[in-house]
Image (cartoon, rainbow, N blue to C red):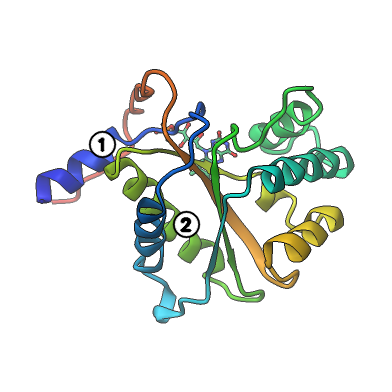
């Protein structure tokens, strides 16, 4: 068990190419269970995990994200991935969740200092659970960047039951990995310090 958990952490990778087939409900529910068993500040558990599995709804959400990025102002010195995300959104084949059959959105209550940290812990649990269950998954940040974009929030409220006041902390795409499972990037040096 100990070895399995450690090996799962070491071998998990971000998957960005998915088969069309949907994941079984049993696996979806185990992934969501892993999310709600994550630690949270003072055991707050104020998160909400919304698993969106309707393909046409996901495609419509993708269109709203594309429109949202068109309006989003991103400064030249902003986070490079955010700059890339805005320009990628204008491409004809853009799909922010890589056509995964399931997208799980993690949101939290407003004005809660640990909102992001709690959801991040839950997202990592979901990525690991997906990997342990033989699925691929990837952290998806676009909805976080568009947290305040009116068209995206209208859509999420109306069609995905995510109230507008909630903060979108992140999301994860889940599905069967298509093609070879990705290899890890080399680990950077000098990121660990031991004080004996
Ligand atoms: C906070 C955070 C945001 C991320 N956002 C995205 C994203 O929007 N799209 C994406 O493809 N990957 C995203 N990733 C995945 C990272 O790119 C990935 O974890 C990193 O390149 C290392 O690769 P690995 O997950 O395969 O180890 C995100 C990861 C984190 C932790």
Q: Where is mark 1, residue-wise?
A: 10
Outermost residue toward the top in this view: 180
Residue 125 in the image: state x and y as whole percent: 36, 54
Which quadrant holds residue 91? top right
Q: Earlier in the sequence, mark 1 or mark 2?
A: 1
Q: Alpha carbon of mark 1 to alpha carbon of mark 2: how far?
A: 18 Å
Residue 69 in the image: state x and y as whole percent: 81, 40
Residue at (66% x, 65% y) in the render: 167
> Taking 144 as reference, is 34 left or right?
left
Assess disc 1: are there few (<14), some (14-19) or many (≥20) residues with their C-alpha within 10 Å of its C-alpha: few
Outermost residue toward the right in this view: 71
Residue 65 in the image: state x and y as whole percent: 77, 43
> Taking 90 as reference, is 168 left or right?
left
Q: Secondary structure at mark 2?
A: helix
Q: What's the mark number on residue 74?
A: none
Residue 140 in the image: state x and y as whole percent: 57, 43
Which quadrant holds residue 148? bottom right
Residue at (35% x, 60% y) in the render: 34
Of residues 109 and 24, which is closer to you in this image?
24
Residue 20's place in the image compared with 159, above or below, is above
Residue at (85% x, 54% y) in the render: 151
**Ligand 1 near label 2 (Cβ, under 8 Å)?**
yes
Q: Tags 1 and 2 in contact by the CB under 8 Å rule? A: no
Q: What's the mark number on residue 120?
A: 2
Assess disc 2: are there few (<14), some (14-19) or many (≥20) residues with their C-alpha within 10 Å of its C-alpha: many
């Amino acid at each position: 068990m100990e070895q399995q958990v450690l090996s799962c952490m070491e071998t998990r990778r971000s998957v960005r190419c998915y088969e069309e087939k949907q994941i079984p409900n049993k696996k979806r529910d185990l992934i969501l269970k892993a999310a709600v068993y994550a630690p949270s500040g003072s055991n707050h558990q104020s998160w909400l995990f919304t698993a969106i599995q309707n393909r046409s709804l996901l495609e419509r959400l993708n269109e709203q994200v594309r429109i949202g990025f068109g309006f989003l102002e991103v400064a030249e010195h902003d986070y490079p991935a955010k700059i890339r995300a805005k320009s990628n959104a204008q491409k004809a084949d853009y799909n922010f969740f890589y056509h995964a059959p399931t997208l799980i959105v993690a949101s939290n209550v407003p004005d809660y200092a640990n909102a992001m940290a709690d959801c991040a812990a839950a997202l990592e649990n979901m990525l690991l659970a997906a990997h342990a269950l033989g699925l691929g998954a990837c952290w998806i940040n676009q909805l976080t960047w568009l947290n305040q974009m009116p068209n995206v929030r209208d859509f999420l409220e109306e069609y995905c039951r995510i109230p507008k006041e909630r903060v979108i902390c992140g999301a994860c795409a889940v599905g069967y990995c298509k093609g070879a499972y990705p290899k890890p990037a080399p680990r950077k040096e000098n990121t660990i310090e031991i004080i004996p």
